[in-house]
Image: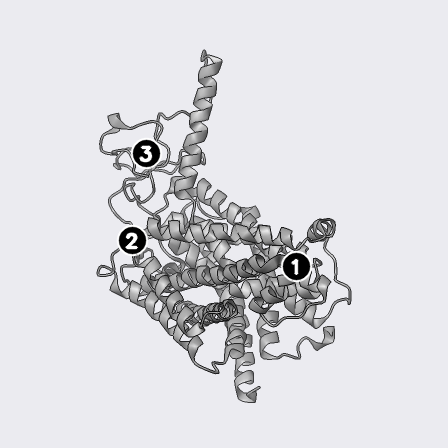
Amino acid sequence: MSGYPLSKPGSIHPHHTVHPLDAPPEQKLFHRELGRMALTPRVKVALFILQGYLGIMVLLVGWKLIAGT
Amino acid sequence: MLHLSPVTTSVAPLDGARLAVPAGAPMAVPVGVPPGAPSGVPLPGQSLPRQVGRQKVALRLRLSHFLMVAGPGLIVMVADNDAGAISTYTESGARFGTSLLWVLMLLLPVTYFVQEMVARLGIATGEGLASIIYERFGVWWGRFCLIDLLIVNFLTLVTEFAAVALASKELGYSPSVAVPLAAIGLILLVGTGSYRRWERMTLLLCGLNLAWLVLAVTVRPDWGAAAFDSVVPSIPHGGLSGDLVFLVVAIVGTTIAPWQLFFQQSCVADKRLRFADLSAARFDTAIGAVAISIFAGCMMLIGDAMFRGGLRYEDPAQMATALEPLIGRFGRIALLLLVLNAAVLGATAVSLSSAWAWGEVMGWKNTLQARLSEAPGFYSAYAVCTAAAAGLTLIPGAPLQQIILWVQVLAGIMLPAAIVFLQLLLNDREMLGVRFVNRPWNNAVNWLVISVLFGLSFVLAARALVPAWPSFLS
């Protein structure tokens, strides 16, 4: 699965493909400087629903632990 | 798993979309298929034999590109048919015959849509899901997801080793030997310092699942009824009951598990899939989704043989023995080995999903390409999870029923959270730009899937916590 030598374009064999692990790394879209996601209304609503759901689940788990069943 | 080297952005030759290359960046470096390679499109004035020749070469290039990219999608799907899944699918067949095959057909596109999202996010960001949740949603949500994932994965691992113990005992080997051996084998599997070696070995284990097809044929199912039940949704004889609802929910919960999301994205990032690999990665995921449905269907058909024969069993290992008159001695051994294989495959995927997520959040070097000495935290996390789960299984009187209950509860908490973050991240234009974000139709489908998963996860967790619920259906 070895690839062709990328540094020598003239030597590229047209019938070969390059395994991702043999290719030079490409710049990805994520970087740490992005920071936190902007809290748009959609994000706020989604997180609010998620918190509500998790709250109900925590109550159920708490009930289970207290009841000891 | 950061790949933030100077820009050597590649241009997608396969999926037609192109990425804007920043000013001053070097020209596109060919990846996947080299520029100038035959496209398969005949040029004006070309003779017919030359056109055919170009098409053959183009096809070969695409196939070879796919074979290089394939792996994460297929592995995550097939590994999802783990010991717990075998138990759920065969129980479904044993209790309701082929009546619930349509659920698998319904889940096929759902599984694909969910896993395609993580593959896309992994390719676009080169990061695992745990790391991105941590960065984009803050420390609280990051820790919540990581801790929940680690606990549910650990408990799932215990169930995998419990299956190893049951199957080895049924094969005549002592669990106190088989379980440690399996744990050692699992640690050696990832510790080779080569992603490719791990992937090839794991794909080999995935390939062994083809034996499910042979076993399904051996039990001589009613193919007509199976085909009909696969495409026509119906309620089994006996009507809608709490048990039926719970089993359907369990099938959904088994088919779409939280660890899968984290696993595939980290796997894609570790394999360093490129933007140009997106189409092939999607195809890989689609093949995996089809494979998981076919193998799960085979398990239901084998359970259906128990249903038709009026046979009873406690676990899949006992089922293999009960089916011996029908499938023969060789079939019994094959079935037990398949249970072992499923447990081992599930264990490596679940452990890796934990180790990758843990390493991402802690900032450790976490790649299967690293040697043991280069990524001690990552490999230690994997080894500790594996060894501790194996050890817990061997404790006499370990509360396995309680563990299964908590797997369901924690999965019911984890899955909706992970999938909501995934959906929000795939609408994050600030991070992903235009090319990788969800399309409007994509969003509509995903929000529908998420709503259903919310409901089903709640039913699964609530039913596990309050066994009498939902009594109104009984």
Badge 3 vs badge 2, beta-carbon distance below 8 Å: no
Badge 2 vs badge 1, beta-carbon distance below 8 Å: no
Q: Amino acid at mark 2?
A: Leu
Residue at 50 percent of width and 54 percent of height: B77
In x, y percent, where is residue B75? 45, 53
First in sequence: mark 2 vs mark 1: 2
On residue B2, the disc is: 2
In x, y percent, where is residue B373? 22, 61
Q: Residue furthest bottom?
A: A67
Could you tell me if residue B351 is visible in this image?
yes
- The one nearer the camera, B154 or B208, is B208
Tell me how far mark 1 sits from mark 3, CA to CA: 55 Å
Using a 10 Å C-alpha cutoff, classify the residue at mark 2 as few (fewer than 14 neighbours), some (14 to 19) or many (20 or more): many
Q: Label 1's element?
A: helix
In x, y percent, where is residue B111? 55, 54
Q: Amino acid at mark 3?
A: Pro
List the residue tagged with mark 1: B326
- The one nearer the camera, B260 or B343, is B343
Q: Residue furthest right?
A: B238
Count of marks overlaid on the render: 3
| B172 in relation to B125, above or below | below
Q: Label 2's element?
A: loop
Tell me how far mark 3 sits from mark 2, CA to CA: 21 Å
